[in-house]
Structures are given as structure tokens and as C-alpha cells.
Amino acid sequence: MAARYITVQYPQSHVVESEHEWQELWEAHSRDSVPEVDFSRHVLVAVFWGDHTGCSERVEGIERAVVRSGRVEVEVGPLPELGECSAGVSPYDIVEIPRTDLPVALIGEVPW
């Protein structure tokens, strides 16, 4: 999924499994058109760190997804360095993972 502009003020995380969920989440936080996702093949994992100061909006905080103990564990690392700017940013990371019947669990430094 290509990065687009989205602003989520408060820390939160989502596993998005349907077009309806995606549209609701996106439209609540962006004025851009909703990016297309093939939910028959993928689900989205979205991590939002809320309002911060820095240079970077789109970050890489989701480190990997692995199947372990009968579930997909999505490992979230710490909020990456945002730079020395004093701009207001709402850093996020959204990744597609293959659709599975296994439950998806976010682990690590997950912002809720």
C-alpha cells in the first residue's frame, strides 16, 4: 500500500480485515481518497503513535510478522527517530500482510 496522508492524534493500533473497516478508519482521519486494498488477499496492520514533534510522518515501526503459537504475531518496535524539526506530526506505519485464518496479535511496543 502506498503511503498517503493520514493524521491520527491519539496512539492506537488496528488490524483491518475488511473494506468497510478500512474506509471508516481512513475517512475518520484523512481527506485523501481511500487507498485500495485487496482484502480477499490481505489484511492491514495499522499503528499510529499520535501527535508528536519531528520531521517524519510515515515511519517504519512494524518490524516483522511471523507465525508463532497458532497466530500471526506482528512485532512493533519503538517509535523511530522523527528528526530534529519542530513540526507537528502524527507518525504511523501501515503494512499489508497475507490474509490468514489465524488470529493476528500485535506484540512489542504497541501504541494503544
Image: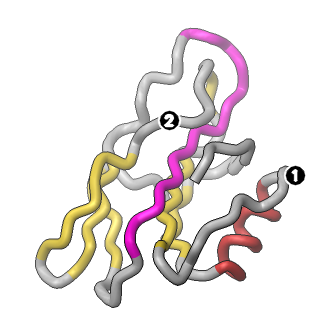
- Residue occupying the far top of the picture: 84
Classify 10 Å Cα crowding around label 1: few (below 14), some (14-19), many (20 and above). few
Q: Residue 93 magenta-drawn?
A: yes
Q: Which mark is residue 31?
A: 1
Crowd around label 2: few <14 · some 14–19 · many ≥20 (10 Å): some
Taking the spot 47% from the left edge, 61% from the top edge, the residue there is 96
Question: In the rendered structure, which segment of residues is drawn in magenta?
Answer: 84-98
Left or right of 67 on screen, residue 33: right
Q: Nearer the viewer, residue 22 or 1?
A: 1
**Residue occupied by mark 2:** 59
16 sits left or right of 4 in the view: left
Label 1 and label 2: CA atoms lie apart by 20 Å
Residue beneath the point at 57% across and 54% down: 1
Mark 2: amino acid: Val
Say the numbered circle drawn on residue 81. none
The image position of residue 5, as x and y in percent, is: 74, 42
